[in-house]
Amino acid sequence: MDPMDLARRIGARVVAGVRPGRTVDRVYAAQYGRAYWPGDRISDLLEHASQTTLLVTNLSSALLACVAELVNVPAICLVGGQDPAKS
């Protein structure tokens, strides 16, 4: 699915552009116990990220941008009221 189409469908606020031609075919959010919780460690995100994975996380540090570039993920969904880090 196109990341921008996905954002529109779920009512997400897009804060940075999406590279044309990118698609999402899986979503990663860590599972803890019986509930699903967003990945809360950079190592979790690195382990499960791919070029077609939407990462769902409560992290918003500048390291998140480094992970996105390193793995070339198509999109990141910040949860828990997080805004992207300024730096």
Image (cartoon, grey):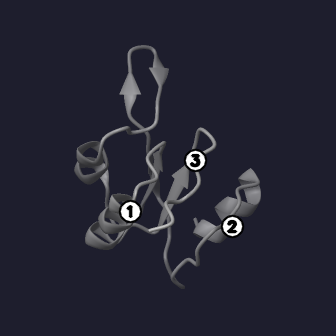
**Relative to residue 22, is residue 11 drawn left or right?**
right
Tell me how far mark 1 sits from mark 3, CA to CA: 13 Å
Q: Is residue 53 above or below residue 66?
A: above
Image location of residue 83, percent across then percent down: 59, 54
Q: Secondary structure at mark 2?
A: helix
Please name the residue shown 38% across and 34% down the image.
30
Q: Tell me the residue that label 1 is attached to.
A: 62
The residue nearer to you, when weighing 33 against 22, is 33
Q: Earlier in the sequence, mark 2 or mark 3?
A: 2
Q: Would you identify the image quadrant in which residue 52 lies?
A: bottom left
Q: Earlier in the sequence, mark 2 or mark 1?
A: 2
Q: Secondary structure at mark 1?
A: helix
**Relative to residue 53, is residue 17 drawn left or right?**
right
Specify the amino acid type for callout 3. Answer: Gln
Q: Tell me the residue that label 2 is attached to.
A: 5
Which quarter shows the C terminus?
Answer: bottom left
Q: Residues within 10 Å of mark 3 (few under 14, many from 20)?
A: few
Tell me how far mark 2 sits from mark 1, CA to CA: 26 Å
Q: Tell me the residue that label 3 is attached to.
A: 82
